[in-house]
Amino acid sequence: MQRLEASLVTVAVVLVFLLLGEGSKEVEASNSASAFVQNAIYSNKIAIFSKSYCPYCLRAKRIFGELNEKPFVVELDLRDDGFQLQSALLDLVGRRTVPQVFVNGKHIGGSDDLRAAVDSGQLQKLLATS
């Protein structure tokens, strides 16, 4: 009976280590997704987190094209880590929706927010400050 109890304790200890190891991988993946998002935002004049099929994302990209600006675009649906990146955006800006547009590190918002920023002249001012 003691031998069985010792075996069960050993199995339990191994399971705990395995579970803890898996948890740290999730944290590491989460940290790397967050680091990627932050790097994309602050290393590029314009960053758009998009999905290739989304009409609102296409609209946002078209707006920058009309302004002769070339954004850095992250197509979340074409990346293996797209879900993690979208979760990192949720943590950062409180939204999972796309597009999410950033100019000079400042969060503009989605497609409607971008259009409003263009119409008010705010976007052009932000673009001129870089």
Image (cartoon, helix red, strand yellow):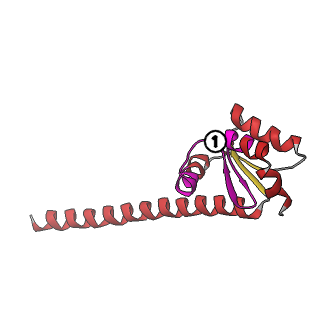
- Looking at the picture, does residue 75 appear above or below residue 93? above
> Looking at the picture, how far across and down is residue 127, in whole percent?
83, 56
15 sits to left or right of 96: left
> Looking at the picture, how far across and down is residue 67, in whole percent?
88, 45
12 sits to left or right of 88: left
In-front residue for pair 123/47:
123
Magenta stretch contains residue 85: no
Residue extending farthest front: 120
Residues drawn in magenta: 87-115
Q: Residues within 10 Å of mark 1 (few under 14, many from 20)?
A: many
> Looking at the picture, how far across and down is residue 66, in whole percent?
88, 40
In-front residue for pair 20/123:
123
Q: Residue at x 76, y 35 (%)?
A: 59
In-front residue for pair 18/124:
124
Q: Residue at x 59, y 42 (%)?
A: 97
Q: Secondary structure at mark 1?
A: loop
Residue position for label 1: 98
Q: Quadrant of the N terminus?
A: bottom left
Q: Quadrant of the C terminus?
A: bottom right
Magenta stretch contains residue 96: yes
Q: Residue at x 20, y 62 (%)?
A: 8
Number of numbered discs on residues:
1
Question: In which image quadrant can residue 93 be found?
Answer: bottom right
- Looking at the picture, does residue 27 appear above or below residue 61? below
Q: Residue at x 15, y 62 (%)?
A: 4
Under mark 1, the amino acid is: Val
26 sits to left or right of 98: left
Residue extending farthest left: 1
